[in-house]
Image: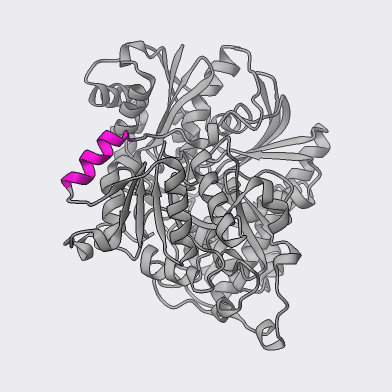
Amino acid sequence: MNILGLSAFYHDSAAALVRDGAVVAAAEEERFSRRKHDDRFPTNAVAYCLREAGIGVAEVDAVVFYEKPVVKFERLLETALAFAPRGFGQFLASMPVWLQKKLHLPREIDAGLRVATGAPYTGPILFTTHHESHAASAFYPSPFDRAAILTLDGVGEWATASWGVGDGHAIELREEMRFPHSPGLLYSAFTHYCGFRVNSGEYKLMGLAPYGEPRFVDLILEKIVGLAEDGSFSLDQRCFSYAHGMRMTSPRFHALFGAPPRAPESPLTQREMDIAASIQRVTEEIVLRMARHVHAKTGERNLCLAGGVALNCVANGRVLREGPFDRMWVQPAAGDSGGAVGAALAYWHRHLGKPRTTVAGDAQQGSYLGPSYSERDARAELARMGAVFEVLDEEALAARVADELARGRIVGHFAGRAEFGPRALGNRSILGDPRDPSMQRRMNVAIKFRESFRPFAPAVMAERQREWFDLAHPSPYMLLVAPVADARMRALAEEERRARGTDMLKVVRSDIPAVTHVDGSARVQTVDAARAPRFHAILRAFEARTGCPVLVNTSFNIRGEPIVHSPADAYRSFMFTDIDALVVGNLYLDKSAQPPMQGADEYKRSFRLD
């Protein structure tokens, strides 16, 4: 049975194809459209999923959408009435798209499928709830027969957080927290206040937090967040405008922190760093309390997480280290895009009652669920662009890449199937030497064109992770932050310990300074030969040359651009940035061998800043 899962019309639209309980393909629409966080119907992603499955739309047995739009509309209407007359402005502003599309989703899905496939779809169109989709995406691909489930995000229909239990093919959701009290909207409000874009800049806020002191925690808990012991909370709505206006925060919020929101792209001050540290600390406390409550209620040893807040890898790391659960699994596409996978799996297992078999590791297949390119297609695409390349076998390619990285050069790596979710896990990655103290700045400023404070993640051979990081748990999806091992840290001079703000970036804290956060932690990706044989081989070759089994791994894109989708995308990014070498499959390209290419400024301007 072929089930097509869809998420769309808010942000990060995606499609996923599940066949008899196995995820065959999944992709975000932004990768194809080149429009970051694309919320439109996932026409291209649908076409890809069917193509990967080798079927036409007539062979799709069911289409399942990741939330229930009528219930969501009910929430918008009730919120407008509850906040009347202030809420009517936002309600009226949202009406055109609801009246044209969102209240008529079966019609919109039919039309979208026809565009994607060129043929009509005649099967059923079904709907799950938003948090059911998240819960299914968290539990069903996990390696656990039984587990507690915790989902946290901005808002679906009404729920903003929920918990339950997964057992075999069954999921029971037992409690939920409801709008307008929301962990995701709380974090997004502070994202907006610190001058970053909502639904995009939350990663920046998390990355900024280690540079600050959490001196506003008491203020937040006394004036804004009424936090209960079980992790539930209420938000003082006088501090926010998202329920009734077009902004996230109110004048009362601004008065509490003594200033209006920071203007986007303006200089960051210690105040924003301290605010980021404070809301990050509060968020971690919320997630920890919720996890402890769920454990107390269920007695389960395993925990599964999903929802946009589950992408807060610092909070995840604390739950694993300090929480009561033995093991934890986080859906790598934890945000709305993963709802497409969850919707399809929920229909297969929960609603049809089909049995489930757990897979060692997990059933997410490394999250390598997106498109791939054959060598023939890659050659043709690169040749059309005038690219000069040589062909290497696997062993020679790993050796060449390791040599280049050991020389301090930066390599773009494009191979195999694309990752599903926001993290590049080696197949659509930019790689560098983590031992180089200048690497973080080089990658941020000359390649990513983004703020210099933004951290990078280490990819480490799984069999070496304990030697380099205080982390015993697998972290293949880059969703856990852990301390760098004491043996890899260096003692700091008194002057270095006194550094504050972005001056902390100048301090070399460890043997791998390019991936060590200013608090001595790192967002770790563990790489094993079974999930990622090519990437593991590169790491092994780099260790043979340097004694270091760790590489900098960041997504292959510039600021504001979706992760590269095609060999042509990869080549443009390679040519218009300071990447020194490019790998596309088994094709190796050196920057010095390439003919000049025009259009760098237009390329950089073509993507809206994140």
Residue at the image position 66 percent from the left and 71 percent from the top:
216
Numbered disc total: 0
Tell me which segment is drawn in magenta.
373-384
Residue 394 location, quadrant: top left
Image location (x, y in percent) of residue 57 = 31, 16
Image location (x, y in percent) of residue 88 = 40, 48
Asked if the magenta segment contains residue 485, the reply would be: no
The dominant secondary structure in magenta is helix
Q: Looking at this view, is 70 or 56 the one in front?
A: 56
Residue at the image position 69 percent from the left and 19 percent from the top:
168
Does 470 appear above or below 3? below
Residue at the image position 79 percent from the left and 52 percent from the top:
322
Residue 165 location, quadrant: top right
Looking at the rendered image, the quarter that the C terminus falls into is: bottom left
Image location (x, y in percent) of residue 219 = 68, 69
Residue 139 location, quadrant: top right
Asked if the magenta segment contains residue 381, the reply would be: yes
Colouring style: one colour
Does 159 appear above or below 504? above
Asked if residue 67 can be seen in this view, the reply is: no
Image location (x, y in percent) of residue 530 = 58, 35
Extreme residue toward the bottom, this view: 495
Asked if residue 234 can be seen in this view, the reply is: yes
Does 155 appear above or below 51? below
Q: Looking at this view, is 503 or 139 the one in front?
A: 503
